[in-house]
Amino acid sequence: MNRKQHDLKALNSLQKHSISIYEKKSLKLICICWAQWLEELQILTGRVEEKRRWSEGIHLAVEAKEGLPIQADSVVMAQITYQSMFKLYPKLSGMTGTAKTEEFLKMFQMPVIEVPTNMANIRHDLPIQAFANARGKWEYVRAEVESMFRVGRPVLVGTTSVENSEYLSALLRASKIPHNVLNARPKVAILSFGPNVNVNGIWFWVNNAAKYVGKSENKSWTYEKAKSIISESIEMSQSMGLDELQRLVEEQSEMYPLGPCIAIAYLSVLKDCEIHCFHEGLEVKRLGGLHIIGTSLHESRR
């Protein structure tokens, strides 16, 4: 074995050992067992990268170590960086919101022209703060969120991992600060506003109902009334066949004018929400607007 082969073997050995260290200790690289297959987690998004495998036999080594079925390793026929691929084209042009860096001039020898914004930037950037340890940083973020919450100002906090978002969420729960978490966990993939939305005070005003439901009088429906009629229609649709429902629609369309009533109810709620959001927006502007906290700097300077 020559020196080059020996160095390559030693490097592979170190790489395979480093996977175990990263997984167990520093969480720089994370792997999970999902349906007896080894998948890679994208560290920035927390989502599984399907059909993606580590190179140089590292994936095979981890599969063997974890007792999983060893799959055929992928073979790289050719590879090229984005920068080198772009240089193959005789002409380059493009537009992006993150072009104001030295990368385009340094890598592609392309000048960058900054297009002015349509409206003046009203964002107020505060200075970056550094902390001696992570606990101090998260405690400061919690205190900052709490101070904004006390005055009624909305806050948006950005984290770089699922674990950090859940850790901060635990701190906020301990301080009894209501909040919503949006990360890559399946349980929060679809946001639900839950029962904390108060709609009992909303009224559905159906004016000039003769145009819509064939009635000669005007009506006003509360939320509970509309909910009762919608629930009744759902129960009927579950207990009756398609032919029975069709016959019911044809014979008793005036008794069950669900389609028009739901449409009118939707428009009434929409109007109420627009009024509510308008006044709420004025209050948020008075307080200074949305308060955004970035808990870490991005790896890319852009």
Image (cartoon, rainbow, N blue to C red):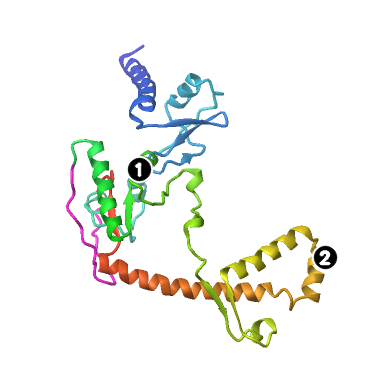
Dot 2 corresponds to which residue? 243
Q: Is residue 125 left or right of residue 192?
A: left
Query: For the point 63% across and 75% down, which residue is it?
Result: 261
Q: Is residue 266 left or right of residue 56?
A: right
Tell us which disc is closer to us: 2 or 1.
Answer: 1
Q: x, y (%) of residue 43? A: 38, 38
Please tell me in which quadrant of the rendered image residue 140 appears: top left
**Which element type, helix, strand or loop, lies under badge 2?**
helix
| Residue type indicated by callout 2 | Asp
Q: x, y (%) of residue 270? A: 50, 72
Mark 2 crowd level (few <14, some 14–19, many ≥20, 10 Å Cα)? few
**Circles 2 and 1: CB distance less than 8 Å?**
no
Query: For the point 66% across and 68% down, which residue is it?
Result: 229
**Which element type, helix, strand or loop, lies under badge 1?**
helix
Q: Main secondary structure of the magenta part?
A: loop
Query: For the point 53% across and 20% down, which residue is it?
Result: 67
Please tell me in which quadrant of the rendered image residue 205 appears: bottom right
> Which of the two residues, 212 or 85, is positioned nearer the viewer here?
212
Magenta segment boundaries in residue numbering: 109-130
Dot 1 corresponds to which residue? 174
> Which of the two residues, 175 or 118, is positioned nearer the viewer here?
175
For residue 85, above or below residue 276: above
Query: For the point 82% across and 65% down, which residue is it?
Result: 243
For residue 169, above or below residue 31: below
Magenta stretch: residue 181 in it?
no
